[in-house]
Amino acid sequence: MCFMIRFSCGSCFLDGDDTLGIPAIPDASQLLYGKVPYPPIANDQLCVLSSVKILMPLQKAILEGLEKLIQSNRPQYWTTIFLSVFMLLHNCSILTWDRYRHALKHAVKVRSFICYMCDNCDAKV
């Protein structure tokens, strides 16, 4: 699930001998410098498929399972709960960093971009 979320950010690259005829990124200022970017068409197709068939069902199952563990209030689950919450928060931080980088790259005001990403933001932009 973590890979699929990161994949949807567009920061994936091809690794290995078969580059599908795509050259490596020559610009040192780019995030994927020296790497072969994943083809945009394939990226979009996999993004739609992964969202509909993998992420949506998994999101509900993971959150419901984690909620049951938390509500059980049993000490033997504390490590599992801690690690699960840590992984989810770590993934959120990576996703937030990627979106922040994207906002800076496209000269979007960071404050307005953060408010756009946040459902309950009351700040005036």
Image (cartoon, helix red, strand yellow):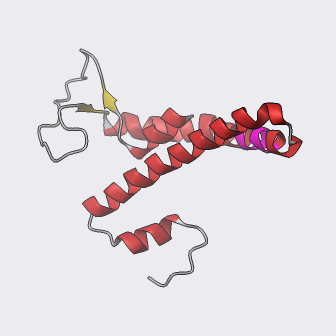
Task: Answer with the quarter of the image where residue 28 lies.
Answer: top left
The quadrant of the image that shows the C terminus is: bottom left
Residue lying farthest top?
A: 17
The quadrant of the image that shows the N terminus is: top right
Task: Answer with the quarter of the image where residue 12 lies.
Answer: top left
Rendered location of residue 68, percent (x, y): 83, 41
Task: Answer with the quarter of the image where residue 39 lies.
Answer: top left
Rendered location of residue 96, percent (x, y): 45, 54
Q: Residue at x 50, y 41 (%)?
A: 5
Q: Residue at x 78, y 42 (%)?
A: 64
Instruction: Count every numbered label the image shows and give the total.
Output: 0
- Judge left or right: residue 81 versus residue 98: right
What stretch of residues is rendered in magenta? 62-67
Q: Residue at x 50, y 64 (%)?
A: 117
Tell me which secondary structure the magenta stretch mostly adopts.
helix
Does the magenta portion include 20?
A: no
Nearer to the camera, 70 or 24: 70
- Judge left or right: residue 69 versus residue 41: right
Rendered location of residue 16, percent (x, y): 27, 17
Does the magenta portion include 66?
A: yes
Nearer to the camera, 84 or 19: 84
Rendered location of residue 84, percent (x, y): 65, 38
- Judge left or right: residue 88 versus residue 29: right
Residue lying farthest front?
A: 75
